Amino acid sequence: MTTRLLLFLAALLALAPTSARADDVPSDRYAEQGKSDKVSLRVMVVHATSNGNKIDPRLQNLTKYLSHLKYTSYELLQTHTAELGANGKQSFAIEGGLKVTIELLAKEEAKVRMRVVMARGAEKLLDTTVSMNRNATIIVAGPKYQGGILVLPLTARY
């Protein structure tokens, strides 16, 4: 069985806050992080289905990006965080028996480049390199999971 994965990069932003949110870190911390080689990584695991029209309130700042998908309901299942240094790597076990590994390849003033690998056991479902703006979020969507798919918003802040 082949699992198709889609990587949505097009419309996906620098989710720099336009208003204060409880989960935001003060901007002076971002400035401090920019002076080090560290990148704060957040990986959310979202179950997207077409069962109803419910959007988890913790995903409100992502709804305009999730609306590009064909699903109508989004539930946040997990959130993982890590601090990655130069060539740092972090793995997360997620729903569906999957493992996601993020590796920091390069950090520049305005962009970060990371390798994203998603696997189920020895089977690699996704192995790609992404480049994203500073303090931005991209969305990796797929594979199938319980009548829908798993969606992974990845945020890198520094």
Image (cartoon, rainbow, N blue to C red):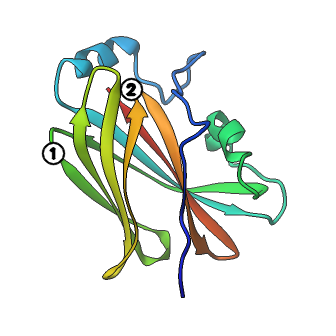
- Left or right, 110 with respect to 53, comes to left
The one of 93 and 102 positioned closer to us in this rendering:
102
* Residue for badge 2: 134
Secondary structure found at label 2: loop
Q: Secondary structure at mark 1?
A: loop
Looking at this rendering, what residue extends furthest in the bottom direction?
A: 1
In the rendering, which numbered label is found on residue 87? Answer: 1
Q: From the viewer's perspective, tell me whether residue 86 is left or right of residue 139.
A: left
Question: What kind of residue is marked 2?
Answer: Arg
Specify the quadrant of the image occupied by residue 116.
bottom left
Q: Residue at x 70, y 40 (%)?
A: 63
> Which residue ends up furthest to the right in the rendered image?
52
Residue 45: % across, % down: 51, 57
- Specify the quadrant that holds the N terminus: bottom right
Dot 2 alpha-carbon crowd within 10 angstroms: few under 14, some 14 to 19, many 20 or more: many
Above or below, 6 against 33 in this view is below
Q: Nearer the viewer, residue 74 or 127?
A: 127
Q: Amino acid at mark 1?
A: Asn
Identify which residue, 71 or 77, lies in the foreground. Answer: 71
Left/right of residue 3 with respect to residue 70 in the rendered view: left
The answer to which of 124 and 45 lies nearer the viewer is: 124
- Mark 2–mark 1 Cα distance, whole angstroms, equals 17 Å
Q: Residue at x 58, y 40 (%)?
A: 10
Q: Is residue 32 above or below residue 155?
A: above
Identified at 16% across, 23% down, the residue is: 36
Instruction: Give the image location of residue 91, x and y in percent.
Output: 28, 60
Of the image marks 2 and 1, the number of the one nearer the N terminus: 1
Density class for disc 1 (Cα within 10 Å; few <14, some 14-19, many ≥20) is: few
What residue is drawn where x is 54% and y is 48%?
Answer: 139
